[in-house]
Image (cartoon, rainbow, N blue to C red):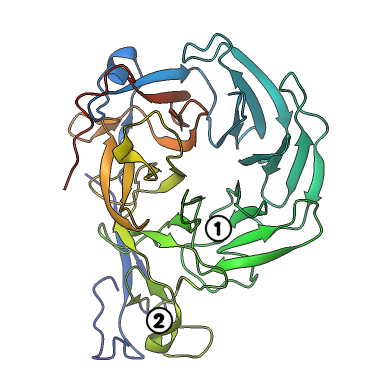
Amino acid sequence: MLPKLTIPLAAALLVGFTTTAQNVPPEATPFKMTGNIYLPKKLPATPERIASLKAPAGFTITPYAEGLEMPRMLVVAPNGDLYVSNRVKGTVTLLRDANKDGKAEVRQQVAQKEHLHGLAMQDGKLYLAAIREVYVADIKPDGTLGELKTLYKDLPDAGQHANRTLQFGPDKKLYLSVGSTCNACDEDNPENATLMQLNTDGSGRQVYAHGLRNTIGFDWHPTTGQLYGMDHGIDWLGDEDQQEEFNQIKQGANYGWPSIIADGKPYPANKPKSGETYAQFDAKAVRPLLLYKAHSAPLGLVFNRGTQFPSEYKNDAFVTMHGSWNRAQPSGYKIVRVRFNEQGQPQQFEDFITGWLVENDKSEFGRPCGLIQHPDGSLLVSDDDNGVIYRVAYATNNRTPKAKKRS
């Protein structure tokens, strides 16, 4: 039997709460948080299971590296060297495909600090994020790293979402995701539940956008330059709420957490700290452009900037859905594609790589996590559950038929 937990709150809280015509809950609305816990049985990633993964016609999925320990975030150098973090041991490992056969033969640990997770690269330097620190190191000609120098050491303390991620924007600034300390609460530190913008010399930082519960994956559209990210929804609102959010992230914008969820729904547990009504607060918040199935846990996000994939994939985004634990029927455990139109606007989600859930969705042999595009145009995907990094490539000598469009 699946565990089903009900968590009453003293102030009274509810999944199907009643609202007034103005969408403002009455002062004493009873409310309770409820949800299911279900973790699919973990299976090994055998060659037979890997071969069973499903992708659009013409794509191949092969192991780039196996036998790793909890590979998380990825960054790749212009020469193809791949760096992968392990947040538990705080290590960064260099992987190199020396003979260009699509599988790494070289494996070498190049850094270790507590809680290393996010990775970014620019101008021959590797930037690394821990919970409260951001480091930088020179990349040596052989791919190893020089001394890790501390740029920042006073980031917010850890909480429920301690996994910082890093990306460089088109402006050459460093962007850092700082998740919330809780499921839903009023944060004391204004840098929690934000996306931060950092100077690469350690001289200062600012909050770029706030009201983001946990936006681990984010990237800039290749032609419009607009920033997009996937934000994690609040847990314990039942199997279907709160849905994951695909946001266009704008400087100075507020994305509603924890008072407004998804497409404008008020969350009674956290009335706006500003004293505004829900309607007033929502009018100032930015709503998501797309919503995805609740509890799927989006992690990696990257736009397709390469030329290996068919032209219909140009400038589309890919997202790893790590997989649910807080719903009766599992969601996620896949890679999805976000289709963009010719005007550079997101249109819809569709499945890209599926099949990690097996045995009628009761078992799994992988949880897609980090995601990066290799210089050759393929996608590299980490699985921190089974220690595999996958390579998703398109057979360039077999471009007919192209991957079928889905409506």
CA gap, disc 2 and disc 1: 21 Å
Would residue 293 be visible to someone looking at this image?
A: no
Where is residue 167? Give x, y as percent.
Answer: 60, 47
Horizontal side, residue 92 vs residue 281: left or right: right
Residue type at mark 2 is Asp
Q: Decide which of 370, 277 is in the foreground and name it.
A: 370
Where is residue 358? Give x, y as percent.
Answer: 23, 29
Residue type at mark 1 is Gly
Alpha-carbon neighbours of circle 2 within 10 Å: few (<14), some, or many (≥20)? many
Where is residue 32? Give x, y as percent.
Answer: 32, 72
Please give the name of the residue rendered at 63% of the width and 73% of the height, measured from the top-left corner: 188
Please give the name of the residue rendered at 32% of the width and 43% of the height, measured from the top-left corner: 337
What element does badge 1 sit on? loop
Q: Which residue is mark 2?
A: 282
Vertical relation: 114 (above or below) 153: above
Location of residue 154 (image quadrant): bottom right
Q: Which residue is mark 1?
A: 179
Mark closer to the observer (2, 1): 2
Alpha-carbon neighbours of circle 1 within 10 Å: few (<14), some, or many (≥20)? many
Vertical relation: 247 (above or below) 274: above
